[in-house]
Amino acid sequence: MAAMATPHDDGVQILKSDSFGRILVVREGGRRFVRRDLGATAWWLRLPAWWLARREARALAKLGAMEATPRLLAWDGRWLDRSYMEGAAMHLRPPRGDVAWFHAARRLLQQVHRQGIAHNDLAKEANWLVRADGSPALIDFQLAVCGDPRSRWMRLLAREDLRHLLKHKRMYCRQALTPVELRLLKRHSWVRELWFATGKPVYRFVTRRILHWEDNEGQGPKM
């Protein structure tokens, strides 16, 4: 995986480059935004890369202009442009002992769920931002699922999103966990058990043996 934030002469920075394309910060006409460029994707991964980008575009469109989440600017099948969000990934600026941050993160997650969106990838600390004012933000909706927030399936996925947030809270703010939150952490859904029994071994094989990724269990690539 390429080094982060590599400058180009044309006003573009490479944030990340991998088998599924490149993530760029583009400066154009006095504005700054993030572009997911599928043009650099390996030919045999173009379909899954397009599918993931399409999922992200759909989720961002549903979120609209919600605060603390990216706004969809454009999606044409090759480029997905979204608004730039200032902030540091959780593992780079951990909210250690910051009870207010975790309260705000839970409220943000509830707002996302009320829009009928489950993020589905919140175990990765890189998908949680700590902004300059200390507030939380969410990025990277490639694996997001959209649906009726009242449906049993979406409620289950929303609970898994919350469990991942509570795992981070246990790591950085353990003393603030409530008895209800501790009980929720102990409850493992069938989705989690199925993923660990079937999906995760396949994911590790593909990412580590075929794509040669090492994401440090969600904290981002080891440099």
Image (tube, helix red, strand yellow):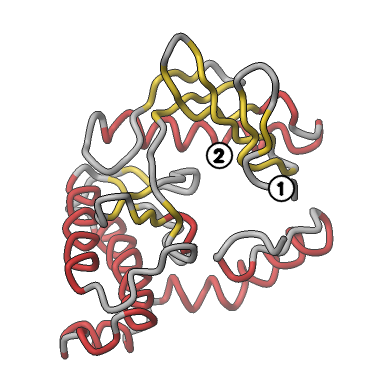
In the rendered image of this protein, does residue 180 appear above or below residue 124?
below
The residue lying toward the viewer, choosing from 108 and 57, is 108
Residue at (55%, 65%) from the top-left corner? 218
Residue pointed to by mark 1: 3
Give the image location of residue 22, x and y in percent: 66, 34
The residue lying toward the viewer, choosing from 40 and 193, is 40
Give the image location of residue 36, x and y in percent: 57, 30
The residue lying toward the viewer, choosing from 66 and 30, is 30
Looking at the rendered structure, the kind of residue marked 1 is: Ala
Looking at the rendered structure, the kind of residue marked 2 is: Leu
Give the image location of residue 204, x and y in percent: 70, 67
Residue 208 relative to residue 49: left or right? right
Q: How crowded is mark 1: few (under 14 residues within 10 Å), some or many (20 or more)?
A: few
Residue at (21%, 53%) from the top-left corner? 108
Label 1 residue SS: loop
Q: Mark 1 and mark 2: span between their CA atoms? A: 22 Å
Give the image location of residue 47, x and y in percent: 68, 33
In the rendered image of this protein, does residue 163 appear above or below residue 56?
below
Label 2 residue SS: helix
Occupied quadrant, residue 110: bottom left
Q: Could you tell me if the residues under marks 1 and 2 are in contact, i.e. CB atoms within 8 Å? A: no
Residue at (70%, 41%) from the top-left corner? 17
Residue 132 relative to residue 37: left or right? left
Residue pointed to by mark 2: 52
Q: Mark 1 or mark 2, which has the lower sequence index? A: 1
The C terminus is located in which quarter?
Answer: bottom right
